[in-house]
Amino acid sequence: MATTKQIHLIISPDVWTKQTRRQLMKLRREELIDHIPLPQAGRTRVWHPTPYGAQVAGEWPELRGRRPPRGAVDRTAVRLKVGHGLTVTHTAQAFLQDARHRGNLCRPLD
């Protein structure tokens, strides 16, 4: 679970944010991810995997044998857990940015 800005900073901070948005919309059209709007936050979107997206990601070698967190793919559950989910993503983002600053290798799935 992550906002567009968080995804952009984690995956591709060196490209235009518009490119990240285009990729997210493409994944949404392919029904791999979906989003909910953040309450009282304007147009901020929180992205999460769909059940199909979680199934596809579960076949990646890095994620084989791991189950998605409970409620990570259901829109209602995402709404209920959005505060915690975004805090976890923010924390991971801080570790990633610090590693990049220090020149250490830290990939999104680390």
Image: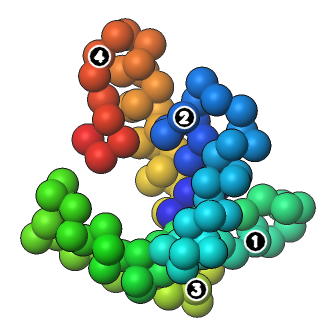
Left or right of 94: which side holds 27? right
Left or right of 20: which side holds 52? left
Residue 110, image x, y percentages? 26, 41
Identify the residue position indicated by label 4 in the image: 104
The amino acid sitting under disc 3 is: Arg
Q: How crowded is mark 3: few (under 14 residues within 10 Å), some or many (20 or more)?
A: some
User: Going from the N terminus, do you reach mark 2 or mark 4 first?
Assistant: 2
Identify the residue position indicated by label 2 in the image: 12
User: Going from the N terminus, do you reach mark 1 or mark 4 first?
Assistant: 1
Q: How crowded is mark 4: few (under 14 residues within 10 Å), some or many (20 or more)?
A: few
The amino acid sitting under disc 4 is: Asn
Identify the residue position indicated by label 3 in the image: 75
Residue 78, image x, y percentages? 55, 78
Residue 30, image x, y percentages? 55, 75
The amino acid sitting under disc 2 is: Ser
Nearer mark to the viewer, of 2 and 1: 2
Judge by depth and name the residue closer to the eye, 83 or 11.
11
Whole-number angstrom distance, CA of label 3 to CA of label 4: 35 Å
Contact check, label 1 and label 4, Cβ < 8 Å: no
Identify the residue position indicated by label 1 in the image: 37
* SS state under label 4: loop
Whole-number angstrom distance, CA of label 2 to CA of label 3: 26 Å
